[in-house]
Each structure stands twice: as structure tokens, then as C-alpha cells.
Amino acid sequence: QVQLVESGGGLVQAGSSLRLSCAASGRTWSIYTMAWFRQAPGKERRFVAAISRNSDNTVYADSVKGRFSIARGNNQYTVYLQMNSLKPEDTAVYYCAARRTTQASTLYTLYDYWGQGTQVTVSS
């Protein structure tokens, strides 16, 4: 099994920045793709960004391109989401996810492991 633990959420004003972290433990050798999703109240979980195991491929949702950046730490099983120019519509619970395949996907149903989520609230 793999455990994912997110941190770094909080309450910020519009235009601010936050960095989320996700640390994987357990059978990390089975993880290839890691990603971030978010879910606002009453809405479906939506893809934010994904990164391949060796960081040579990243994918972003159109809504965050140019503002958010996903990266792996020196420990390749730690993933960060740098969020700049935050908007009120970015308010959501952010989840870290991981897949046992090399192909990134925007579909949350295709991810094998999930963290417990961290709340990000952006005030106007």
C-alpha cells in the first residue's frame, strides 16, 4: 500500500501564493505518476496537474496554466504544487493522487492512491 499525506493549505487573499506538499510512503516503488486534484463544495473532483516519475512530463488543467506549477522534490516521492495568483475560484479541497502507470490522466477514477486532502480558501 501507499500512503499520501498533503500539507500546506490555508486561507489566503486573492493574488497570493501557496505551496502544497504531498509526501508518499509505503510501497513507493510502485508509483509512477503523481497528480493534484481539487474538489469545491457541491462539485465534482477535478484534475489540476500531474507529473511523471522522472519529471520529464507535466500536464496542467487549462484553468491553472501559467499560475500553478507541479514539481517533485529531491526525494522523487514528494510532490509540490506551487500556486500563484490565486483566485477565489481556486477555493477547494486539494487532493494528492498517485498512479501505478506512467501515463498521466485527468480522470480521478484512474488513480490508485489518494491523500486525505488539504483545504485551500481564497478570499476576494
Image (spheres, rainbow, N blue to C red):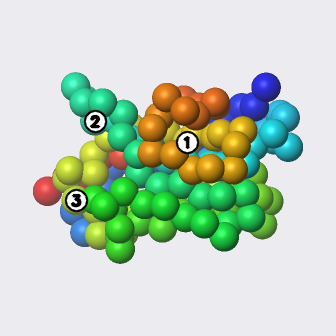
Residue at the image point whose x is 57% and y is 50% from the top: 104
Report which quarter residue 80 is drawn in: bottom right
Tag 2: Cα neighbours inside 10 Å, few (<14), some, or many (≥20)? Answer: some
Which residue does the numbered mark 2 point to in the structure image?
40
Q: Is residue 82 above or below residue 104?
A: below
Determine if residue 64 is in view: yes
Residue type at mark 3 is: Lys
Determine if residue 24 is in view: no
Residue at the image point whose x is 58% and y is 39% from the top: 97
Pointer 2 with pointer 3, Cβ within 8 A:
no
Identify the secondary structure beneath mark 2: loop
Residue type at mark 2 is: Ala
Residue at the image point whose x is 55% and y is 64% from the top: 58
Where is residue 86 drawn, in percent x and y? Answer: 29, 62
Total numbered badges shown on the rendered structure: 3
Image disc number at residue 96: 1
Report which quarter residue 57 is drawn in: bottom right
Identify the secondary structure beneath mark 1: strand
Label 1 vs label 3: CA separation?
20 Å
Q: Is residue 63 above or below residue 9?
A: below
Q: Earlier in the sequence, mark 1 or mark 3?
A: 3
Where is residue 26 drawn, in percent x and y? Answer: 83, 34
Pointer 1 with pointer 3, Cβ within 8 A:
no
In-image side of 69 versus 64 (left or right): right
Q: Earlier in the sequence, mark 2 or mark 3?
A: 2
Where is residue 4 drawn, in percent x and y? Answer: 66, 36
Tag 3: Cα neighbours inside 10 Å, few (<14), some, or many (≥20)? Answer: some
Number of the front mark, 1 or 3: 1
Pointer 2 with pointer 1, Cβ within 8 A:
no
Which residue does the numbered mark 3 point to in the structure image?
87
Q: Earlier in the sequence, mark 2 or mark 1?
A: 2
Residue at the image point whose x is 81% and y is 39% from the top: 30
